[in-house]
Image: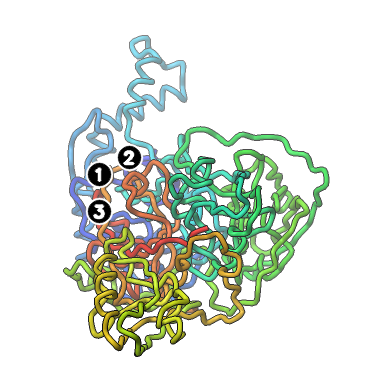
Amino acid sequence: LCCECGQFHLLLDNHLYNFQDEVDDELICHICLQPLLQPMDTPCGHTYCFKCLENFMQEYNFCPMDRKKLSFQQCHKSSLLVRNLLDKLVVFCPFKAECQQTMQRCELEAHLQNRCPGFKKYRSEQQRKKNPVSKGKEDPPAKVETSTAKDPEVPSGGSSLVAESSAAAVVSLGTAEPGLVNPAFEETEEGESLIQKCNYRTSLVAETTTIEIHREDPEEELGMRIVGGKDTPLGNIVVQEVLRDSVVAADGRIAPGDHILEVNGINISSVTHCQAVSFLRHPGPVLHLMVLQEKGFSNKTAQQDSTSAANREVIHVTLIKRDRSEPLGIKLIRKTDEAGIFILDLLEGGLAAKNGKLSRNDRVLSINGQDLRQGTPEAAAQIIQTTESRVNFVVLRQPGVQLSDPAEDGSTSNNSSSSSNGGSPVHHRRRLDQNHYRRKSYYQKGYVSHEKTVAVKKEPKESLGITIGGGRDNKNKLPIYVTSVQPIGCLFRDGRIKRGDVLLSINGIDLTHLNYYEAVSALKSNAASHSVVLKALEILSVNSTEPSPDIKEQGFSWSPLWITWLGLPGHLHCCQDIVLTKGNLESWGFSIVGGLEESKGNQPFFIKTIVPGTPAFRDRKLKCGDEIVAVNGVPAVGMSNSELIPMLKEQRNKVTLTVVSWPGSLV
């Protein structure tokens, strides 16, 4: 127990205080999310606790908020005025059972040493434990235990590693990107990591499961919608929705939020969206899927089963770090059906990926000679982070088919929540009042939109010959789009309107805000004239080598791929507000990826993970793959990950997320 603050914490960590009132955000450290202690100012205008900044600068050479180059020597103490304001913050005595006093923060240490009955009682009990002979009959052990239980709350000590956003049990090792630890679902009201807070009793659990899907008709749809892919910030392939009365729904084991890792033995955890759709639409009576499933918080430890090393290969790999802080770019996972640690992914551009000798699904037996056969991702991360140069892996590999990745440009996104140079501070951003956001489309990787005007001469009774889908009454509030061009109408003869085109207007009548039936009525009434002028938007793939899923979609009802909607101009996006509420000790229950990055430019923020049993899960409106447009009316456009995450942390019990929700690709 610390004699200065009266709470339990590691020797090198900051003191902990229970503040009487909510502290102004200007006085909060954005590393520990607590009111500043021994505040230090950076040249770029940010302020952090002395210990927080000192520890951070031992690993990195940039400011945590805007990632500008920084050294600890450039920083200086905050003004006396700021330090006095912080010292005068009112705190509770931590020994609430015996002492209900409040005082200024700077007076707490003297109170504990000289006046607090609770601290005096604690010290006498500790003395009796050290010297059992001095125990008197008037203080039986039962009484000591009871009073000890009433001592101040004990946050679990240590800065234990927190799971990365792609899956709660996944740890990204040695990353230099602060946004990778995603507090959108890990932070409590006190700014303490939820995983750290529950370290001794609960943990976030994710399991890998192999599922066998049987279908009588080999070409029948599975009946689920998917989002993600290596060509999007989401990285992995994620189930967005399971359709009612489908093959997958009847099986009952796949749920929204599951990450699909393998299809029939082929690794799809790092393929493009279109490739994943093709694999999942492949006809066959039996489909073998390996999925990663979030299980939420659990008090149970993972089952440890012995596994045979038969038909497996032991491989030795050495990675050499240029300095202690260099990231390896490895994501580790703990399985519940098999003991040990497994490699889930190798981050693009990371040291391990460049080395090329480690593979996904390798089981880590040891690192630097330390046995990890029954280990945890946290233990492995600790070994790696404390290693100066050479990191020696011994892994066990199961022979299998590895899908070779197609050549991609250097801007391909990985599934980390990375951050980069930010813009203006979050609290200076202008709030918008309107409910519907019209904004410039700033993410069209893979697909671009092209507006075209089609004028067609026709017979009065001749039909247009198209079928349509979408409409603003649709649950995703989609624009009107063409689902088929029939070989009997004037548009088929003209040839310029294609399946998938978004219809903007007909004969000057705007179609972009109509519901489905209003659009059908407008098209029919204008089709009676001798000439028709259609304005349409064609969404084109910029990658001509990308295989079209249309090739193998016989038997599948047609709808646009999820990734094509990402190329839609911003003025056609229809946003909705989702209000989440939570208790003081709950997490929001979702993780995010995306944001402004130096190497990739502007990317939207996507919901990647929704943890079962949390407010986001219970609300049922938020879906994996949803794009966050704004938080409490503040636009997210142009923000870096390191700007948006603190903004989400600041929301105590209620947050309004403005999102765009596109339907996932049907498989």
Earlier residue among tags 1 and 2:
2
Q: From the image, state whether disc 3 or disc 1 is nearer to you.
A: 3
What secondary structure is found at the residue carrying circle 3?
A: strand
Which label sits on residue 108? 1
Residue position marked by numbered label 3 in the rendering: 579
Question: Dot 2 lies on which element?
Answer: loop
Rendered residue at 45%/47% (across/down)? 11
The quarter of the picture where the N terminus appears is top left
Residue in the picture at 31% in, 47% down: 619
- Tell me the amino acid under the disc marked 3: Val
From this view, report whether residue 664 is shown above or below residue 514: above
Residue 568, image quadrant: bottom left
Residue toward you, 323 or 234: 234
The answer to which of marks 3 and 1 sits earlier in the sequence is 1
> Label for residue 434?
none
Which residue is depicted at the point 63% across and 54% down?
262
- Tag of residue 6: 2
Q: Residue at x 57, y 72 (%)?
A: 548
Q: Is mark 1 on a helix, strand or loop?
A: helix
Any part of residue 13 in sight: yes
**How far, Cα to Cα, is label 1 from label 2?**
9 Å
Categorize mark 3 by other alpha carbons within 10 Å: few (<14), some (14-19), many (20+). Answer: some
